[in-house]
Amino acid sequence: MNNDILLDMYDEGYYLEHLVDRIKNLLNTDFSNAISKAKNDQDIYHAANDVVRKINKLKPLFEEAECELDGVAADHISEAMMMILQDAGYFDIDQQELLAAKEW
């Protein structure tokens, strides 16, 4: 489990911790598990799309809490995904492509 991801989202004070925890959990479990089974870049992008679709479903919760998922959140999330990927030995992944399925 990568405890260093999404620290900026926690530090900003704008995003509620329990909502950031949910994203962190998705990244540390679903995304990390899928990456460990990836055979190629296509598998990685597929795993990223799957986890981003799950994050998309959290959007109403963020809106209710008046802390929307926005461009800043997208940057933090894609950086977290890159940290996970680099820890797994993947360095040539397009960071913007990781969030291709985002709806915020």
Image: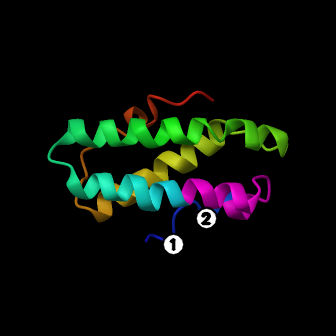
Mark in front: 1 vs 2: 1
x and y percentages locating residue 23 in the rendered image: 57, 53
Q: Nearer the viewer, residue 72 or 67?
A: 67
Q: Are marks 1 and 2 in contact (CB under 8 Å)?
A: no
Whether 65 is drawn above or below 46: the answer is below
x and y percentages locating residue 2 in the rendered image: 45, 70
**Which residue occupies the extreme left position in the image?**
39
Identify the disc placed on residue 7. 2
x and y percentages locating residue 65 in the rendered image: 83, 46
Identify the residue at image location x=57%, y=60%: 6
Q: Secondary structure at mark 2?
A: helix
Q: Nearer the viewer, residue 23 or 71?
A: 23
Q: In the rendered structure, which amino acid carries the disc numbered 2?
A: Leu
- Please tell me how crowded label 1 is: few (under 14), some (14-19), or many (20+) other residues with Cα within 10 Å: few
Check the picture and name the quadrant holding the C terminus: top right
Q: Is residue 104 magenta?
A: no
Q: Which residues are magenta?
A: 10-24
- Please tell me how crowded label 2 is: few (under 14), some (14-19), or many (20+) other residues with Cα within 10 Å: few
- Decide if residue 87 is on the left or right side of residue 68: left
Whether 20 is drawn above or below 57: the answer is below
Identify the residue at image location x=53%, y=60%: 25
Q: Quarter-wise, where is residue 49 in the image?
A: top left
Identify the residue at image location x=46%, y=35%: 99
Identify the residue at image location x=53%, y=48%: 77
Q: Is residue 21 magenta?
A: yes
CA gap between label 1 and label 2 equals: 8 Å
Check the picture and name the quadrant holding the N terminus: bottom left
Disc 1 marks which residue? 3
Q: In the rendered structure, which amino acid carries the disc numbered 1?
A: Asn
